[in-house]
């Protein structure tokens, strides 16, 4: 019963990335959490003090691994809720801790019970999905790879762990190996079509990161036809990849006057879905960008690169590819006149350039052959570009998320330099944007802010 309630709660988290969805998911799982917490306390945390401790010996590893799975998942999910909202959930008895959750799941893996593989998958998903979206440069891939190898050795045809092996390769920026793993995952079975869709999604981004717009568009088209998760997102991505291929093939083209591309952007709004009466934030973003395409006479500023940025794929780029992106952004800013390029577009362009330079810094500081001068140059270029993005704050008409995101990037850049006071100043500026105007992707940005705040708190109270 508790497990069924847990799955119901997790579906609420999966359906949307909004704060409201996370609260609803947590409240739905309150009864389940209470059951798991009681079982965890009674049979695992304090069995020696419990009057029914004789029952502990009769419990199988299958049963105990199930308790650890549920309790660990709840702890991880609740730990990702921002502090102010977590205080509200604590009033109804819900508490979360990342460390406690991971420890519980690790114990579940060690037991080799019925739910142990699911405990392993929960740990992997936390590191490769949730933590990747919040702090992609500090992921414990050693633990992830150990779990993947352990279960692939036992179950060499398990599609879930083959998928995770592809995801691991992508996080290590080995896109060729990642694509090989995802394709193998697809060929292993035909019954679980949702896994095919998940692999297509990863293959789409792998192709897009290589600027292979045709291949990326092909996967987006497959997803649009076969998957019902978010046809609005898939159609917008399909249109963006087709647009980029159209424009890149002829440098003289600034506008996508191809009627097929125009129709794709026009149809984006037709497929929006509502969950509990609310539209998905990412779909609202896609609809607004598609509307901008029409308002700007069939023009968007590098929509495929913007999609890669918004979906967090810049963190998976090799340095050479990141610098290709920078040159592409700079070239478009230089070759298109002010009349053709809006302040929104210019702010976005400088935001992406700044984020890419920050990525180059994070990648190259791990390399022993990178000089201190080169590292400082990356930081200076990142800060310069992000400040240019902020200079358009009063001129931007629609894409106000650019200002919030630029403030966050600057906060993280100063955190990396151990300039914590300045980092906190930019975090406050980021939060202040939402008090002035509603903007796209607010929840996504606020979760990043929450994560950076937690990192600052670990060093000094904020």
Image: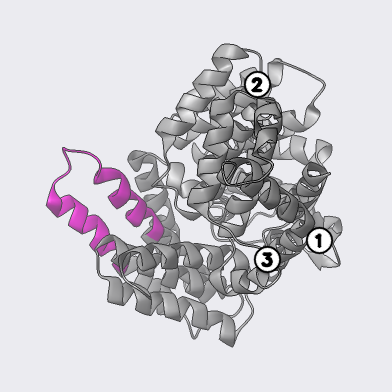
Q: Pointer 1: what residue?
A: 269
Q: Nearer the viewer, residue 354 or 243?
A: 354
Q: Is residue 318 above or below residue 389?
A: above
- Tell whether position 364 is magenta: yes
Picture coordinates of residue 205 (x, y %)?
58, 39
Q: Are marks 2 and 1 in contact (CB under 8 Å)?
A: no
Residue shown at 29%/71% (left/top)?
420
Q: Pointer 2: what residue?
A: 185
Q: Earlier in the sequence, mark 3 or mark 2?
A: 3
Judged from the image, the secondary structure of the residue bearing numbered disc 3 is: loop
Q: Is residue 308 above or below residue 80?
A: above
Q: Nearer the viewer, residue 18 or 245?
A: 18
Q: Quadrant of residue 17?
A: bottom right
Tell me the crowding category of disc 1: few under 14, some 14 to 19, or many 20 or more residues within 10 angstroms, Cα based. Answer: many
Q: How many marks?
A: 3
User: Magenta span: helix, strand or loop, mainly?
Assistant: helix
Tell me the crowding category of disc 3: few under 14, some 14 to 19, or many 20 or more residues within 10 angstroms, Cα based. Answer: few
Picture coordinates of residue 438 (x, y %)?
64, 79
Please indicate whether residue 175 sits to the left or right of residue 5 in the image: left
| Structural distance between the alpha carbons of marks 2 and 1 | 33 Å
Judged from the image, the secondary structure of the residue bearing numbered disc 1 is: helix
Q: Nearer the viewer, residue 72 or 211?
A: 72
Q: Pointer 3: what residue?
A: 93
């Amino acid at each position: 019963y508790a497990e069924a309630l847990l799955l119901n709660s997790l579906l609420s988290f999966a359906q949307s990335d909004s704060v409201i969805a996370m609260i609803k998911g947590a409240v739905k799982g309150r009864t389940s959490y209470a059951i798991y917490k009681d079982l965890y306390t009674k049979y695992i945390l304090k069995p020696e003090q419990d009057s029914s401790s004789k029952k502990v010996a009769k419990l199988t590893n299958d049963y105990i691994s199930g308790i650890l799975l549920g309790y660990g998942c709840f702890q991880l999910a609740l730990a990702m809720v921002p502090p102010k909202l977590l205080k509200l959930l604590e009033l109804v008895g819900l508490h979360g801790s990342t460390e406690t959750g991971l420890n519980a799941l690790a114990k579940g893996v060690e037991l080799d019970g019925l739910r142990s593989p699911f405990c392993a998958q929960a740990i992997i998903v936390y590191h490769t999905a949730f933590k990747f979206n919040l702090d992609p440069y500090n992921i414990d891939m050693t633990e992830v790879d150990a779990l993947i190898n352990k279960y692939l050795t036992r179950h060499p045809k398990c599609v879930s762990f083959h998928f995770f092996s592809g995801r691991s390769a992508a996080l290590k920026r080995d896109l060729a190996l990642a694509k090989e793993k995802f394709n193998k995952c697809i060929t292993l079975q035909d019954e679980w079509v949702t896994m095919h869709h998940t692999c297509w999604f990863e293959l789409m981004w792998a192709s897009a990161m290589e600027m292979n717009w045709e291949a990326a568009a092909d996967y987006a088209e497959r997803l649009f036809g076969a998957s019902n998760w978010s046809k609005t997102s898939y159609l917008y991505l399909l249109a963006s990849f087709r647009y980029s291929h159209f424009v890149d093939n002829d440098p003289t083209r600034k506008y996508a006057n191809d009627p097929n591309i125009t129709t794709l952007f026009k149809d984006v709004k037709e497929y929006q879905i509502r969950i509990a009466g609310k539209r998905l934030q990412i779909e609202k973003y896609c609809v607004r960008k598609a509307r901008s395409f029409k308002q700007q006479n069939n023009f968007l500023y590098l929509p495929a690169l913007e999609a890669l940025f918004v979906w967090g794929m810049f963190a998976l780029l090799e340095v050479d590819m990141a610098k290709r992106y920078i040159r592409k952004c700079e070239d478009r800013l230089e070759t298109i006149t002010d009349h053709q390029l809006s302040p929104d577009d210019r702010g976005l362009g400088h935001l992406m350039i700044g984020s890419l330079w920050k990525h180059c810094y994070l990648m190259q500081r791990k390399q022993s052959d990178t000089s201190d001068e080169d590292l400082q140059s990356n930081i200076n270029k990142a800060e310069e570009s992000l400040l240019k993005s902020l200079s358009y704050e009063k001129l931007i008409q629609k894409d106000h998320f650019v200002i919030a995101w630029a403030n966050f990037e600057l906060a993280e850049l100063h955190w990396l330099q151990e300039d914590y006071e300045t980092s906190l100043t930019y975090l406050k500026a980021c939060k202040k944007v939402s008090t002035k105007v509603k903007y796209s992707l607010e929840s996504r940005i606020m979760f990043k802010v929450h994560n950076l705040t937690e990192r600052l708190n670990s060093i000094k109270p904020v």
